[in-house]
Image (cartoon, helix red, strand yellow):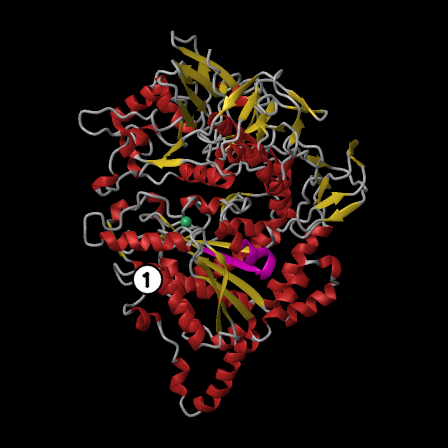
Amino acid sequence: MSSHAKKMMVGLGFAFLVFCPALLLAQTSPEQFLGFRVGTDRKLADFHQIHAHFQKLDEESSKLQLLTVGNSTFNKPMLLAVITSEKNMDKLDTYRQIVKRLRDPRTLSEEEARNLAREGKVILLITCNIHATEIASSQMAMEFAHKLVTGQTPFDAEKVLDDVIVLLMPTINPDGQQMVVDWYKKYVGTKYEGGPMPWLYHPYAGHDNNRDWFMFNLAETRAVTKVLYHDWLPQIHIDEHQMGSTGARLFVPPFMNPPLPNVQPLLWRSVNLCGANMSYDLQKQGFKGVVHGRSYTGWWIGACDDTSWLHNVVGILSEMASVRVASPIYVEPNEIPQTYYEKSMEFIDPWPGGWWRLRDLVDYELTLTFSLVKTAHLHKEDFLFNFYQMYKNSIEKRDKNEPYAFVIPASQHDDGTARRMVDILLFGGVEVHQAKEQFIAGGKVYPAGSFVVKLAQPYKPYAWALLERQKYPDLRQYPGGPPIPPYDNAAWTLPLQMGVACDEVTETFAANLEKLEKAPPPPSQPVDASSPYFLFDCRANASYTAAFALLNQKAEVYRSKESVQAEGFEAAAGSFLVKNSPDVQKSLPGLIEKLKVRAYSLQDIVSIAKSPLRLPRIALYQSWRSNMDEGWTRYVFDDMGIPYKTIHNDAFKAAKGKRVDLRAQYDVIVFADENPDIIKTGKPSQASEYARFFTANYPPEYEGGIEKEGVEALKAFVEAGGILVMMNQACELAISDLQVPVRNALERVERTKFFCPTSLLRVEVDNTIPIGYGMPEKAAVMFSDSLAMSTRLPLPEWDRKVVASFPESDILLSGWLLGEDLIARRAAVVDTSYKSGRIILIGIACQHRAQSHGTYKFLLNALLYPQEEKK
Ligand SMILES: [Zn+2]
């Protein structure tokens, strides 16, 4: 409600309440509202109920204000409840201004900072339920809010809320929350109760919604990022998760090794302080099985709480042992692994096993969340002053290995993508400047228009970790033994992933710089609308979007087979040639404006070797095993305006007595990165290390895979001229079942001999052949459970061309690589042909989490493969 209306109610209510203190508790509890106690076995509140309960609390309490801070992918409101004392509620803007001032020590003396730390309030952000099946926190949030506003807390709530502004987001994945509750309710009481959904629990990303926190692809990530680094600037942030069922009951920090070197020591100490207080408060109340220092490392950038560390925000992770969504489980003591059976200093009070219920999760989470609120209150001034201090360190203290700046030169392979990267940096809170004049840095001349990221800025750790190349430490189980894998990526270097040139400059330099709010569009170039032809250079990813848009309106489009001169510019082989027409003339200005892409005029294309294009009919396979890479591929297609149809297993099954004719329906079929056994049968093979994770049973309509029939239909599709695109692990299906003249050199190689956990590697690209069109000759690729392929002399009817391959040495660009010699000279991308069609093997993660824009073209070129001209 409005603060004015609230004040009126508070004013009126006060006189009345003197005589009627019972009404102080008049806020509707979740139990009254829902008709069941939060955390009751097999009972869940869905998003609409949670939303309605928070609206009710907003109406009833002057200590809670419900805001919407954005919309989800499916347009649900992103809810944020502000909970603080009535007094603070009237001065929220003042307190937001205070933390804003504390964030920039360049304009604030230490003494002023001390005063502001005294005057200000700690802002604590609590985000729940990012992983939708980890549902307990979305339920807990209702009870937490109600208890906090009614003072049913383990502390004096009046006093604590006077120091702390709590920002509570009951779910930061509302679409997923609703899907999971709907699915659970549909099958409760059947043999599928508590089982997994056959689709992703975020519309695009599934579990990977917690891998998006530097790229900001998802609407939900953007909404929370605005709260974190633009609108509210919390000092503390907790993200509440769940983990497996049979180990510890709860993880809270400290985190385990290795730490990201860019994060400040004071930040880690603050994280540890909060974690220790949580463990302590839980222990006091007899909660068992709390662990720290295991499983979750201090090395990463992609997760919600991790990106907080890099912004000097005290980022906390909690991970509860799961039940089966809302169904209780019984854990036999012998099912508990030895490491969670024995006492150790990280795990001092083991849980003995037995029943485990949703309410247990709610109780632990209430306790740990209240503990964090109390810690925020106890150390209020410290947290606020440290906030200032860490930003001051960022700006004033220079590490001996620290570069002075990163420079993004004005001249880029793909200018639009470079500008997109600048916008991503700005959204993450990074200060970026643009040079107004030419300057010299690190002995190199940079033209005006180049971008500069100076590291002496408030969010230095973040800017640094995002732009530099990672060197993951060589951690082994024992000396010379197998590597200890990182929690997720070993590397993420954004310029390498996006194919953007970016130089690290060690020594200081002077330049005439202008601070940016947004990446400026490239200088506009007039288009001669009467030109008979237009050209879009295929080095720019945006040119592919333009090509799809023009093909969609039936424009005549070709791909050049060689480099083309247009208006004195040399466009790359594979560039798009578009014949002018009234429709083209009409749509061109809009396309150029929207895509920030350049169209060059061409007088004639007769002398240019070229192939015609037509709008491909694209199918994207979606298994019923919630494959995240399929979701990200869909994201890339939607983002780039690429039309496609999602197909499932039934697309490969013919009616009785008939054969499936995929070629009649599609020109290109795309398989995202997925285990080939899952594609074929819906299950990993029994021999696979993943087999033990696949214990769930699905309703019959979601069982199985494309089966033998599907493999045969794919082969017939290729024979008849179709293009089959296999990405990463899916390549194995073509190798094992479609007889491509290729093998994977890494098949059955042990981890001690070869290990490369999601890292960036160097490849050499043949950009004179279609799949390599528009790529630079040297590129960085994301290697993530990827392949290193050897081709062989093909049988008749087959052919193969290596598009990209790993060099002889110095393959690692960022991250961790053991056993380089096993992939040296091997192929990363191979274009094979069989009869009239093709199988494109993209053995690396070319559209990894919609982050690796620098290698999108391998996929885009497969979609817009030039047609052979009829002989
Ligand atoms: Zn999680």
Q: Nearer the viewer, residue 632 or 403?
A: 632
Would you say residue 82 sits in the magenta stretch? no
Q: Residue 152 occupies which quadrant of the picture?
A: bottom left
Q: In the image, which residues are magenta? A: 225-239
Q: Is residue 120 above or below residue 205?
A: below
In terms of secondary structure, where does tag 1 sit?
loop
Say if residue 154 shows up in the picture.
no
Position in image of residue 92 (x %, y %): 58, 70
- Name of the residue lying farthest toward the front: 582
Position in image of residue 791 (x %, y %): 45, 13
Q: Is residue 610 above or below residue 523?
A: above
Q: Nearer the viewer, residue 231 or 314?
A: 231
Name the residue: 49% across, 26% down: 864
What amino acid is labelled 1 in the image?
Ala
Left or right? Give the position of 232 relative to 399: left
- Number of numbered discs: 1
Q: Nearer the viewer, residue 388 or 581?
A: 581
User: Is ligand 1 closer than 8 angstroms to the Cβ of mark 1?
Assistant: no
Q: Within 10 angstroms of label 1, few (less than 14), some, or many (20 or more) residues?
A: many
The residue wearing badge 1 is 45
Left or right? Give the position of 466 relative to 279: right
Name the residue: 55% across, 45% down: 214
Q: Residue 583 occupies which quadrant of the picture?
A: top right
Name the residue: 46% across, 10% down: 871
Q: Is residue 388 above or below residue 660?
A: below
Position in image of residue 659 (x %, y %): 24, 24
Position in image of residue 415 (x %, y %): 65, 35
Left or right? Give the position of 755 relative to 138: right
Would you say residue 227 sits in the magenta stretch? yes
Say if residue 189 shows up in the picture.
yes
